[in-house]
Image: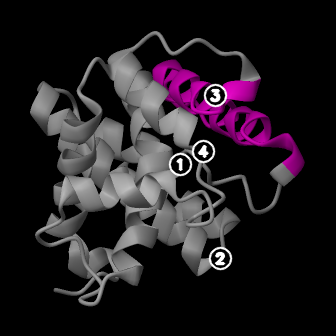
Amino acid sequence: MTYDEAMNLLKEYTKSESLIRHALCVETAMRCYAKKFGEDEEKWAITGLLHDFDYEQYPDNHPYKGCEILKGMGVDSDIIDAIMGHAQYTGVERKTLMAKTLFAVDELSGFLYAYALVRPDKNLKDVKLKSVKKKLKDKAFAKGVNREDIELGAKELDVDLGEHILFVAQCLQDNAKNLGLEE
């Protein structure tokens, strides 16, 4: 599957602007980590882009339905396994670096995007870790974000949580224009 095919599939199944933006945020973080780890950037970007593509149409059967669709399209099994593994309730073990990274950046990307929107400049420029961690402790802020998954993701990826937060924040800021976080 090419990037353009993945984008078309995302837009075919997902009409919500916020869900598309989330997919773009996760894609951005996946691409950055792929570059950092010397992995296939396009494959990792596609995985991030498609991880929730079925959620809007099949919320009660996500990511099972999406992975069924992807299998039918002949998408690589490691992409499908990573997408299945990003949802804790599937019980699919995250065995690959790509799967661990997808899980590690999913909730964090959503949290950081929400965090950027409440900042006066509406971006992630000059983010202070202490400030992000304070917001993480505030359960009323971005209450749909699973904080335990953020911590577990960093642990499974074997990276320091603080470094992980700042790395993903920088990735999102570097793509601010495309993500709606204008500088």
In the structure shown, which secondary structural element does the residue marked by tag 2 occupy?
loop
The image quadrant of residue 120 is bottom left
Q: Is residue 77 magenta?
A: yes
Q: Earlier in the sequence, mark 3 or mark 2?
A: 2
The quarter holding residue 15 reads bottom right
Q: For mark 1, what is the residue?
A: 50
Instruction: Check residue 146 in the rendering and tell me which mark sits there, or answer none.
Output: 4
Asked whether, in this view, residue 125 is left or right of residue 138, the answer is left
Tell me if label 4 and label 2 are in contact, CB under 8 Å: no
Callout 3: 10 Å neighbours few (<14), some, many (20+)?
many
What amino acid is found at the position of numbered circle 2 in the picture? Ser
**What's the amino acid at mark 3?**
Met
Residue 142 image label? none
Give the residues in magenta: 60-89
Cα separation, mark 1 vs mark 2, equals: 14 Å
Q: Residue at x 11, y 26 (%)?
A: 38
Q: Which residue is mark 3?
A: 84
